Image (cartoon, rainbow, N blue to C red):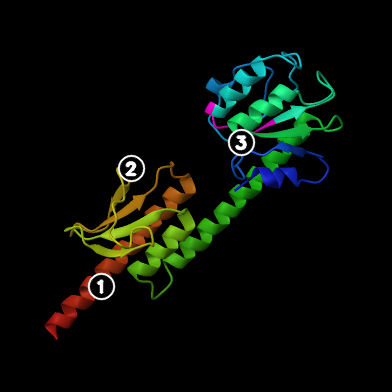
Amino acid sequence: MARLSHLLSTPGLGLRLVQAGVGDPDLSWVSTTELLDLGAYLDGGELVLTTGLALEEDDPRWHDFVASLGRARVAAIGFGVGIAHARIPRPLVAAASAYRVALIEVPPPTPFIAVSKAVAALLEADELSAAHRALQAHRELFVGGQNPAATIATLAQATGRRIAALRADGSLLAGSSGLAGGSDPGAHAERIPLDTAGTVLVVAGDDPLSPDARALLAAGAMALGIELRSAGGEQDRERER
């Protein structure tokens, strides 16, 4: 993932972490604003850049500004000093601490467009890495000798989801560590049919699947169907013998 720490360590930007947030947040995009209430226009995970042009240094509305961004689950606030304010206003620092929103200082030599380009480069590198992992997982799914347990382990590692194959009666055929004990996959779990006998692939998780992850699960379901049909044929031949 493209994380805030990766951006902070990008050479040439001179960014400084003034107030840490919760953990090391993932970055989804960059938004530049001087609006006081931007939360309704965000999806979460953004780095919000501002110069604080609309507020004086001791304006109490800094609290509302950060509260709105905190509710929108932004990754961080980037404050450009040297334009409207010589330093980051103390009420902004206090509000960022109260709402546990990461706050970084963007120094005067660094234009906001340079920060935006750096985030875009991190996101692009992350997408390329994800595509490479998906391609490698596709290859592993169809190598000889795979079995349901190995296939599910490959899918779970590549997608970061809890995955299990369940028989028609609900018993566990194979599963990743999160579902191997037959635990409840939750109301948001997806179920993908694997064969005509009622075996299903259960994929548990709350976040939406990426297109790469969904394509990988489709390929995994195909591979599992082939493995189950092959295993069924072996069992029929064993019974005949």
Name the residue at 64% across, 45% down: 3
Dot 3 lies on which element?
A: loop
> Label 3: how many residues lie within 10 Å, few (<14), some (14-19) or many (20+)?
many
Magenta-colored stretch includes residue 73 = yes
At label 3, the amino acid type is Ala
Question: From which residue to which does the magenta span run?
Answer: 71-77
Seen from the viewer's position, the closer of residues 131 and 18 is 18
Dot 2 lies on which element?
A: loop
**Splitting the image into 4 quarters, where does residue 70 fall?**
top right
Q: Is residue 48 above or below residue 20?
A: above
> Label 1: how many residues lie within 10 Å, few (<14), some (14-19) or many (20+)?
some
Name the residue at 40% across, 43% down: 206
Q: Which residue is mark 2?
A: 188
Seen from the viewer's position, the closer of residues 122 and 99 is 99
Mark 3 or 1, nearer chain start:
3
Q: Which residue is mark 3?
A: 75
Could you say where residue 109 lies in the image, as x and y percent from the top left? 87, 32
Q: Is residue 162 above or below residue 42?
A: below
Mark 3 or 2, nearer chain start:
3
Mark 1 vs mark 2, CA separation in Å: 30 Å
**Splitting the image into 4 quarters, where does residue 217 fall?**
bottom left
